[in-house]
Image (tube, helix red, strand yellow):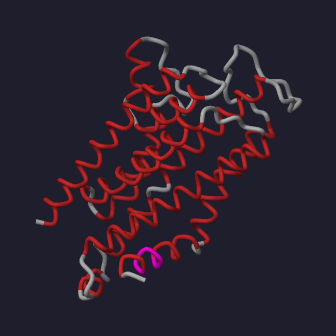
Amino acid sequence: MSNLGLIFKHYFKREATSLVNIGVLLALPMAFIALNLMGNIGMFDLIGEQVGADLTNTFEFTATTTAITILFMVSFQFFAGELILRAINEDLRGEVRWRLFATPNQGKSFLIGAAASSWVFNLIQGILIFGLSALVFDVYWGNMLVVIPLFLLVSISSQLIASLIAILAPKRAAFGIHTGMCFLMMFLSGWLFVDFGDGPVARFIMYYVTPLGLGARGILYAGPVGDDMRQALFHLGILAAMTVILAFLVLILGRRQKA
């Protein structure tokens, strides 16, 4: 196995065997989804009337379960970006960095291995939510040819945002800033029960300003809730452009910090 493969294996084993990661990043989102769907608390009023208490396989229930699941799936993708942030802060910027850099491996090998393991963990989290929500709660995800690219871009952008925070923020404040950024994106996307109104400025902020909003709205449009493939593809294109910009910023700022 190559050195890069060993580094990936080390980080992925550490992340996948952590009880905190398993509980917070894998079990918690599924628990939130299950409690909200089984309790049928009416988080969303998508069709102008509350969903009935009986969990029937109607359009109304499918739309509500889909919206709730998308909210948690996309949001927890960004919260899981903490994995790459932890690897950078605790290892590459921590006390063990001198031992790591004393090995024959270059610093970028550790960064690539840590980023790849964090991304794979994110993918596993999303796949579990996809599969279990569809099997247990009959969630309909819509056109997977559009949903999968949107999900992949959301996952990649979550890693890039966490990497930017690791590069720019002070080490002690990085985790708090990352958590605050995740909640800020949820707030700006209209997911925290904040009524921004229905004006053009409010819609622009909720739909197009954050990668969280772009990914969630795009997936909604690709399914039974929005049922507008043109809008789904439009959100996909903007999210792809935003992800490229984030990657460019990580590369440029990372090189400057190294210099």
Q: Is residue 31 left or right of residue 112?
A: right
Above or below, 198 against 18 in this view is: above
- Does the stretch in magenta take in 8? yes
Place residue 65 in its image quadrant.
Answer: top right
Of 41 and 97, nearer the camera is 97
Q: Position of residue 230 (x, y in %)?
A: 49, 20
Q: Main secondary structure of the magenta part?
A: helix
Q: Position of residue 77 (x, y in %)?
A: 51, 50
Of 182 and 61, nearer the camera is 61
Q: Residue at x 31, y 59 (%)?
A: 166
Residue extent of the magenta highlight:
6-10
Q: Residue at x 71, y 51 (%)?
A: 31
- Does the stretch in magenta take in 183? no
Q: Is residue 202 left or right of residue 95?
A: right
Place residue 54 in its image quadrant.
Answer: top right
Of 23 and 4, nearer the camera is 4
Q: Quadrant of the C terminus?
A: bottom left
Q: Position of residue 67 (x, y in %)?
A: 64, 32
**Count of numbered circles on the image:** 0
Q: Residue at x 71, y 29 (%)?
A: 64
Q: Is residue 160 left or right of residue 197?
A: left
Above or below, 40 against 33 in this view is: above
